[in-house]
Image: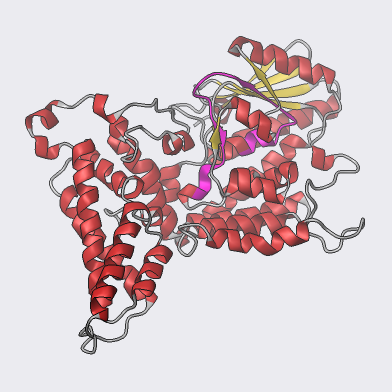
Amino acid sequence: MEEHNIIREEMHDAGILTWILDTPGSPVNLLDAAFVAALERRLDGVESRRAQDPESVKGIILTSAKESFCASADLETMAAATTADAQEVHDLALGLGTQFRRLETQGVPVVAALNGSALGGGLGLALATHHRIAVDIPGIRFGLPEVDFGICPAAGGVLRTVRLLGIERSLDELLLSAAIMGTGDAMQRGIVDESVEDEEDLLPTARQWILDHPDAVQPWDADGYEFPGGAPRIPTPAGPNPLTAVLQFLPARLRSRLDALHNPAPRAILAAAVEGAQVDLDTAALIEARYFTQTVISPVCSAMIGLRHTDRKSAGPQAMDATTGAVPDTATAAAGESTPGVHADTAEVRDDEALDPTRRAGPDAARQMVADLAEAARTAARELVTEGMSDISVSRAAEQAGLSSSLFQAIEEAARETAQRGADGPLDAGQWPPLDTVDAQRRLLSAIADAGRRHLADRDPAAAALLNIASVDGAGYPAWTGGIARWSGA
């Protein structure tokens, strides 16, 4: 792939460069090794020109030839990554971090003209510019949804949001919430600076901003910069640090997450945010790259990408949230794609599904599976109590496994009822060995998955993917497992 095709360059007569992201052969712009090389080449060119004539380049505008601005690294490549790929993964993250830092320190104003969605690493790229202008139209989305894919953001997603919003706000409003927002909300959060109503106004507005701000720098590179909400230094030069009390409670916030014990991404994000806030940006990029690598090569990352990306891609317009019947666009948007909301009841039914209703995976099939999963959960809970585990311990095991919604409720009720029946007479528990929480979690997850996989059998990939999604979104099976189709019990 020719590097100059990935980032095309146009020169405006005022000395302003427009860099158009346009990855050949792809519907979206991806942050891969070829992109790093292309960006490095463009930055080398700017530095060479300005060395000969400092006035030859007055500013840079980043925009896209695609419907979206920029996506993240390729999700399918990340899903396939193992420990053997750790160095390659780390090099990609560090390469992006290095080039993004070069971009924001070129000595000329840089503007992101956001004609489409910027999610994950794509938003990280936009944050490495001095000003972000977005079209305010329905469907455009911004956010850092990586935590829902088992990934710690790289490409400056952690280190720049922390410096822009402060540690507490960046974690609550972006990094740990995986919030996806439109242009208006993005402006309120502070990750988009300006909006225009018509895409035709993007580039003229960006050029004018560059002419009006020839000395633009990032806030954290300006003299007198102070961390919003305080930096994690105890004490600060000004006295007591207001962030001290907040930092003490951040680990407790992680424990409140359903996937707290199994998804490594929230812990990695918290560590990258706090550690990176205590060092310079280059060192923070190293820290961020390390945690990105640790999470990407984790089996949980592969499972969650399979659920949030591969299954939704396979299921297509039927990829509904079983609780609402609406197509959730978070996962497809994170890959730089756009899926309009489609209600399952009005989704087109393929001819083979119409001929063979048993192969359909619409709302009725999803509801039946959810009911069967709940019954399997009740049975497993009763067995655990019968074998001598207390009902409270069974409920705790379910909670720690990340089971929620109807599945957790079914387990809690069945365990309590079984224990109450046992109060009238001793349960025959002496013949079984003692159970610990890990054993109980595995038993519960396996029993539910076995019941669900019977619904997946003999279905086409799209129908099976839809039911796998429904097991998580509708029934409350833990997302960190990748859904019932991927749970192996190992």
From the viewer's side, name the closer residue of 216 and 10: 216
Q: Is residue 43 left or right of residue 388?
A: right
* Percent position of residue 462, x then y: 24, 38
Q: Residue furthest bottom?
A: 430
Question: For residue 47, which quarter of the picture?
Answer: top right
From the viewer's side, name the closer residue of 479 and 473: 473
* Percent position of residue 107, x then y: 82, 32
From the viewer's side, name the closer residue of 484 and 155: 484
From the viewer's side, name the closer residue of 90 and 347: 347
Question: For residue 60, which quarter of the picture?
Answer: top right
Q: Residue 130 lies in magenta, yes or no?
A: yes
Residue 270, relative to residue 342: is it above or below? below
Q: Is residue 302 left or right of residue 92?
A: left
Q: Is residue 340 left or right of residue 387?
A: right
Residue 381 in view here: yes
Q: Residue furthest front?
A: 424
Q: Residue 81 lies in magenta, yes or no?
A: no
Residue 41, relative to residue 384: is it above or below? above
Q: Is residue 82 left or right of residue 320?
A: right
Residue 452 in view here: no
Image quarter of the C terminus = bottom left
* Percent position of residue 312, x then y: 34, 38
* Percent position of residue 300, x then y: 42, 57
Residue 289, relative to residue 366: is it above or below? below
Q: Residue at x 46, y 62 (%)?
A: 83
Highlighted range, magenta: 124-147
